[in-house]
Image: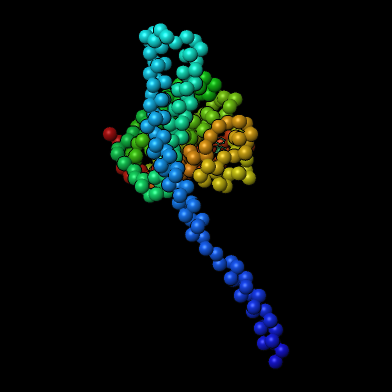
Amino acid sequence: PRLPQEMTLEFPSVERVVLVVYQDVSALKEAERLKDQFISLATHELRTPVTIVAGYADRLLARAARGEEHGLDEWQREKVQEMKLASWQLASLTEDLLDVTRIQADLFSLERCSTDLVILTRKVIKRLQATTDRHQLAFQTTLPQLWVKVDAVRIEQVISNLVSNAIKYSPGGGLIEVALEEHTETHEVRFRIRDWGMGIPRTQQAHLFGRFVRAENARAAGIRGTGLGLYLCRELIERHGGHISFESEEGVGSTFFFSLPCLESVLQ
Ligand code: ADP
């Protein structure tokens, strides 16, 4: 007869806990939606003016280099060069933000076409090698060509992001290896991008593919970034049906891996 009494004493407090936990989250969701809408509108509006500024800075410098622009002295040339770099950085940030909003709004699609990944990778390496004297970019592959059906622009973006990061986070310079292999048994191609730079602290590795996530040592070193590149890389690779990962040790270096399924691997 004493047991039911004890039980009735406990029930009211359990009910109160349940009532407190139940909350309305619609205001939070609305705020999140408005923030995404604002970023989307702002970046659409930024895109045109920023591309114009970047384009004119490019043209001014090109004319000065050909000797056609007599009005630019050394100081002005240097400042236009800085304007060019800053405006291209802004243009690239705008593109990344647009990609993020397209992905979030599910307005993103791939345009696959038959692509030679060997030529594509060589092209990216050549372009990025021209931006640095302190790093040696080495391409390792035994394949003369590798045709796969992918969105070439997007895969170029991924390779470019990962190799740029390898350069950026090896401020002392050094070797950067890019390897490409075909695995016929699993019908996939595998990329590996390796550097001997600052590495990523173990405690910060788990969320690195999240939006706007940056490691503490990169911030502390004063290296600029947005934390959007790896998020986009993962989205792009996974939308191709592939997989991306990394191994890293702080102070030793990092290796990023990604695979792509060979939807169409035809030797031409
Ligand atoms: P961003 O470079 O613009 O900050 P990313 O999304 O490309 O953004 O990278 C996220 C973070 O991951 C970087 O801020 C940096 O802390 C870390 N990171 C990425 N690649 C490397 C690398 N190769 N070596 C060391 N840290 C890296």
Compared across the picture, whether 75 is left or right of 238 comes to: right
Residue at 67%, 79% in the rendered image: 10
Ligand 1's image quarter is top right
Point out the residue furthest to the bottom here: 1
**Taking 175 as reference, is 109 above or below it?**
below
Quadrant assignment for the C terminus: top left
Above or below, 186 relative to 56: below
Residue ID at (43%, 35%): 94
Instruction: Give how far across and how far down residue 199 sits, in percent.
Output: 60, 36
Query: Which part of the image, by quadrant, shows the N terminus?
Result: bottom right
Compare residues 245 and 228 and report the one nearer the observer. Answer: 228
- x and y percentages locating residue 219 in the rendered image: 61, 35
Tell which of 263 and 57 is nearer to you.
Answer: 57
The answer to whether residue 61 shows anywhere in this view is yes
Q: Residue furthest right?
A: 2
Question: Residue 145: which quarter of the image?
Answer: top left
Determine the residue positioned at 60% across, 25% down: 172
User: Which residue is at the front of the view, 219 or 140?
Assistant: 219
